[in-house]
Amino acid sequence: MLKDLLLQFFLSVLPVFAFLLWHDKDRSWEGFRPFIAITSGLAMLLCLLLSTPSVNDYEVDFRIVPFVIGSLYGGYRALAVLSILHVVLRAPTLSSVEEAVSFSLFLAFAVLLLTGFMGRFQRESPEGRERIGVTVISFQIIITISMMTVIMGMNGRPWTLTIVLDLLVAMAGLLLATWLSVYIIEGIKEKQQLHNKVDHLSLSYRNEVEKLQQFIDKAPIAVMIVDRDARITHVNEEGLRLFNLMPSYTSVDSLKNKPYAVVFLEGAGDMCFTILEQALKGRPTGTVPHMEDGKTFLYTAITLREVGSLRVTGAAIIAQDITELSVLRDELGRMERLSLVGQMAASITHEIRNPMAVIRGFVQLIQERSPQNQHEYFRVIMEELDRANMIINDFLSLAQNRDLKMEMGSLNSSIRDLEPLLLADANLRGQSLEVSLCEDLPPMRMNDREIKQMLLNIARNGMEAMEEKGILRIRTTYDNGEISITISDEGVGIPHDIMGSLFEPFFTTKTRGTGLGLPLCLSIAERHGGRIDVQSQEGQGTTFIVSFNILAQ
Ligand code: ADP
Ligand code: MG
């Protein structure tokens, strides 16, 4: 009897062991339902075909275990198929009406229970599922025992100790088989979920590392990472350049695993070495500037530590070329000064221009009423007043930071408009003017009034720098999206040492100059997205080139 029970036990948990063999973590859970339903069906068949233990002539087989497990995991369809199989297998062995009635009751009760628990089973936690499995079997055991009792009563058979013991062993076996089946399946499921989670985590971790790596490699800063043993573990392309490693090392790979002490060269290298050394000792290094070949670099070393223990695991050094930034800062300073000038101009206009107009009016009035011999004094007064007025006007133009009305126009036609004025000016000074305009100059976005003002200022400077017979040449060219106006004179030229101050407000070398002409020209050019280049040779002449990139406008 015990041997038979043992065999039944193993047969009933067969689907689970088959699943253990079949399961494969890459396949995931697809096909699980039909698999468990089919193997359960087979197990039921085997349970019935192979030796059946009987308790007091009442056959106790473990078919109910694969039936319950197959239905709970296989779903409603599996329950239907397994129920039919149950009937087909059992029907031929039914020998009496009682048996038929008890079997029908047994099956109906099982189907009812399973249908009731199915939904909950799908939603439950692993422990909850074990509970549901055991509960369903317990109910089935209770109903079996009840029916056994009834049949025994009808047949007039008494309960003996052997029957009770046999029954207890069979019950324990049934409960154990059911619990074990759910326990094993859930264990595999949990493991699979864990496996998926680890897979997912490691994938997203790899992605993050990859992203970080790309960021380091593409970032416009130099990065070098060293380990605790002072060996280079990573360096980016920019690092090759900014750490001055180029001539000796041509690729980043050739630097891997090299001790950083041997790769750094003189100059900036010494400093990199020192701050990396400090960072590896866990000391803060701050940011260290370094100037070389007219360029400015910033170096920072960082200590890398293990999360939690804070043990030093390495260090990183970052270098940045801030030359452009310093140029930009200077530029910004200049712009700020210019806008300050603008603000001053705005207030000066109101405060000075009006009283000056009044003064000029009265001076003119007095001049008319004064004797002829004093007229010269009044002329000088009025000339000076006009000059002061001109300074204020220049100021005002410089302060014009408001939005300009820009229209598509041609630089050539602005120059043509100015030509008579410039020609008259040149003639007065005994100089000449040569204008050569590029035929296919494209139109550009510009403010005609401002452009004229700029050209006039530069041209006048040129004439003022020249003696008699000097020639002022104005030329327009177009090349590769860039429109250029070149204004060259044959004047005294600009000494090298004042070249940097030309565009500063109030910088002038003339006794009656304002020093506002060129700053005004520059602000006009910049408002048009252009720039001004100056080339000069002392004693030979000066060339101002104003260029506008119309593609970037
Ligand atoms: P201003 O003409 O009132 O002096 P600008 O800003 O127009 O003021 O010019 C500043 C200075 O730049 C001039 O004083 C002069 O020294 C120099 N400069 C400008 N253009 C020329 C030029 N074409 N040749 C020589 N020096 C020039
Ligand atoms: Mg000038």
Image: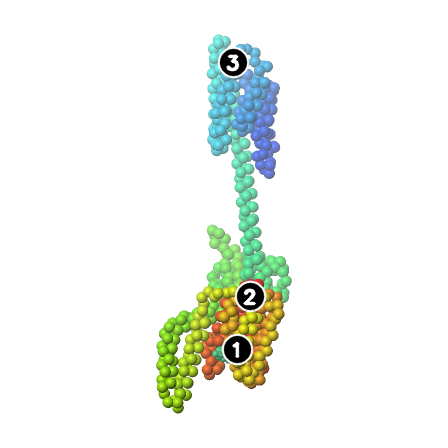
Q: Are marks 3 and 1 in contact (CB under 8 Å)?
A: no
Q: Is 246 above or below relative to 84?
A: below
Residue 444 - label? 2
Q: Residue at x 55, y 37 (%)?
A: 192
Q: Earlier in the sequence, mark 2 or mark 1?
A: 1
Viewer-closest of 45 and 381: 381
Question: Callout 1 environment at 10 Å: few (<14), some (14 to 19), or many (20+)?
Answer: few
Query: In the image, residue 301 lies at what x, y percent?
Result: 51, 61
Query: In the image, residue 114 lies at what x, y percent?
Result: 50, 24
Residue 421 - label? 1
Q: Residue at x 43, y 74 (%)?
A: 393
Q: Residue at x 52, y 67 (%)?
A: 446
Viewer-closest of 55 and 499: 499
Q: Earlier in the sequence, mark 3 or mark 2?
A: 3
- Mark 2 vs mark 1, foreground winner is 1
Question: Callout 2 environment at 10 Å: few (<14), some (14 to 19), or many (20+)?
Answer: some
Question: In which quadrant is the C terminus drawn?
Answer: bottom right
Residue that label 3 marks: 101
Q: Secondary structure at mark 1?
A: helix
User: What amino acid does circle 2 point to?
Assistant: Met
Query: In the image, residue 183 lies at what x, y percent?
Result: 52, 31
